[in-house]
Amino acid sequence: MMPDFAVCIVLPAYNEQHTVAHVIDQINSTLGPIYEQRYSVVVVDDGSTDDTAREASAAGAYVLSLRKHEGLAAAFRAGVSHAMLVGADVIVNVDSDGQHPVGDLPRLIGQIVLGYDLAIGSRFIHDSPGWKPWIQTFQSKSFSRLFGYASGVQIRDVHSGFRAFNAGLAERVMITSSHSYTREQFYRASQQGARIIEIPVRYTARTMGRSRLIPHRHLTMLGITRDLVKWEMEYRKPRRTIAISIMWGLGTVVCSLSMSAIIYLKERTALYLAEIGAGSAWTFVGVNDVEDRKGS
């Protein structure tokens, strides 16, 4: 019997002309026999300069094109807004680069049908992906532990974008970050009492190109510090927030400096060291901005 709920699959994409059509074909092969006409696929073209939009449209997806490259969080917001407009009951985010295990979509959607508000495909429940650099795996696990501590909800893979959620959560949780939606959605959902579950999945190594939606990960780490402080100030007492932000800030600065030193020695460029200085200043301004508004 065909399900009585509608599913919308959202694919943020930036210069993914070589992979997006294949991902769409995989989605159709996986969901078509189960949901028939009760699912749709929307590709959010984040200002691509290649044929991403054309390839996605030819593969049968609805293409929503942003006027310029705005980043992952903006593409996610646009995709969720579209899903709500078309009346989706369940919204699923899938990367357009082919790394997410599309075959696990029924399992992920099934958790929402069972009553969970947010279901996250976790890479770290059983083991770590061997193809991913160890330092990125270490960072992902460390950030997840800290978010688990700050939110009060255990999370193993807060960075995973392979996730499904219901329309109610989409309405309640507004994404304001300019970096990535993954951490903010989890944190806000946890503070609102949402039912959250992780299921084990295995990502696939990217076969061509590289990640373009978040180009400078070590600078983004420092931006996360600013965002977490803001969210903590919304839901927690100032004393606890300041303690967490100091611990978080020291950790991200040390980790970022280590990454930058490695990259600097490898590539012989001062670009990344300059980014650390800018990122540190950004974090400092963000913390003071939050404290000033709290006291006003």
Image (cartoon, rainbow, N blue to C red):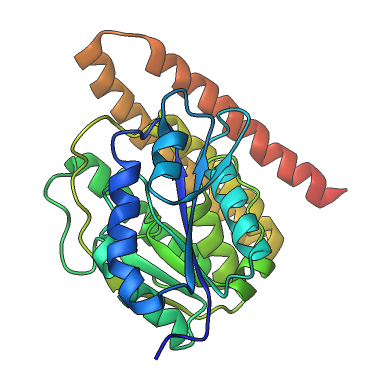
Q: Is residue 152 left or right of residue 238?
A: left
Q: Percent from the top left, x then y, of residue 87? A: 64, 70
- Picture mark count: 0
Classify residue 252 by image quadrant. top left
Query: Residue, x 37% and y 59% (percent of image)?
Result: 162
Of 265 and 114, nearer the camera is 114
Furthest residue to the bottom? Answer: 1
Horizontal side of residue 104 vs 230, given as left or right? left
Q: Is residue 296 above or below residue 210?
A: below
Residue under the point 36% across and 73% down: 108
Above or below residue 139? Residue 103 is below
**Residue nearest the observer in this picture, 47 or 150:** 47
Q: Nearer the viewer, residue 242 or 183?
A: 183
Residue at left offset 26%, top offset 21%: 263
- What is the quadrant of the N terminus in the image? bottom left
What x and y, as percent, mark residue 159? 39, 53
In this picture, residue 295 sits left or right of residue 286: right
Q: Residue furthest left?
A: 130
Indicate the quadrant where residue 274 lies: top left
State the residue in front, 282 or 112. 112
Q: How far across and down, in percent of the image, does residue 151 sit?
A: 52, 67
- List x then y, in percent, for residue 35: 40, 76
